[in-house]
Amino acid sequence: MFRQADLILFTKTDLLPYFEYDIQKEKEAARKLKPNVDILEVSTKDEESIKKVAAWIKFKIGMR
Ligand SMILES: Nc1nc2c(ncn2[C@@H]2O[C@H](COP(=O)(O)OP(=O)(O)OP(=O)(O)O)[C@@H](O)[C@H]2O)c(=O)[nH]1
Ligand SMILES: [Mg+2]
C-alpha cells in the first residue's frame, strides 16, 4: 500500500496527545518503503491542514 501511495495522510492528529502513537516513527517507516512519498498531517479541527490536502490534489491535477 505505502509503496504505491503518492500521498500519506496522518489523520485525526488533534488526538495525538491522547494516544501513545509515535508519528515521527511512523513517518520514518513510511519513508523507508517510499522515500519520496508526500506526507501530510490532517485534522478536521485544523482548517489549514484540510486546505493543504486540497492544494495537494489541485497541484496533482494541474500536472496532468
Ligand atoms: N477528533 C477528530 N475526529 C475526527 C477527525 N476526522 C474524523 N473524525 C471522527 O472520526 C469518526 C470517523 O469519521 P470518518 O469521516 O469516517 O473519518 P475517517 O478518517 O474515515 O476515520 P475512520 O473511519 O475512523 O478510519 C467520526 O466520529 C468523525 O467525527 C479528526 O481529524 N479529529
Ligand atoms: Mg471512515
Image: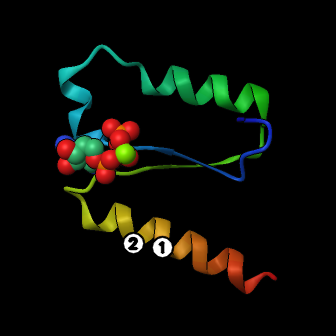
Q: Is mark 2 within 8 Å of ligand 1?
A: no
Q: Is residue 25 left or right of residue 14?
A: right
Name the residue beneath numbered marker 2: 51
Q: Is mark 1 within 8 Å of ligand 1?
A: no
Name the residue beneath numbered marker 1: 54
Q: Residues within 10 Å of mark 2 (few under 14, many from 20)?
A: few
Rendered location of residue 12, percent (x, y)? 30, 42
Q: Residues within 10 Å of mark 1 (few under 14, many from 20)?
A: few
Q: Residue at x 20, y 26 (%)?
A: 17
Q: Which amino acid, mark 1?
A: Ala
- Location of the N terminus (image quadrant): top right
Q: Secondary structure at mark 2?
A: helix
Q: Residue at x 30, y 13 (%)?
A: 20
Q: Is residue 45 left or right of residue 11?
A: left
Quadrant containing ligand 2 reads: top left
Q: Is residue 38 left or right of residue 48?
A: right
Q: Do the residues bearing badges 2 and 1 touch, measured as CB atoms within 8 Å?
A: yes
- Location of the C terminus (image quadrant): bottom right
Rendered location of residue 16, percent (x, y)? 27, 30
Q: Residue furthest top?
A: 20
Q: Which amino acid, mark 2?
A: Lys
Q: Residue at x 48, y 73 (%)?
A: 54
Q: Secondary structure at mark 1?
A: helix
Q: Tell me the colour scheme of the image.
A: rainbow
User: Quick check: 26 above or below 57?
Assistant: above
Q: Which mark is residue 36?
A: none
Rendered location of residue 55, percent (x, y)? 52, 75
User: Quick check: 28 above or below 52?
Assistant: above
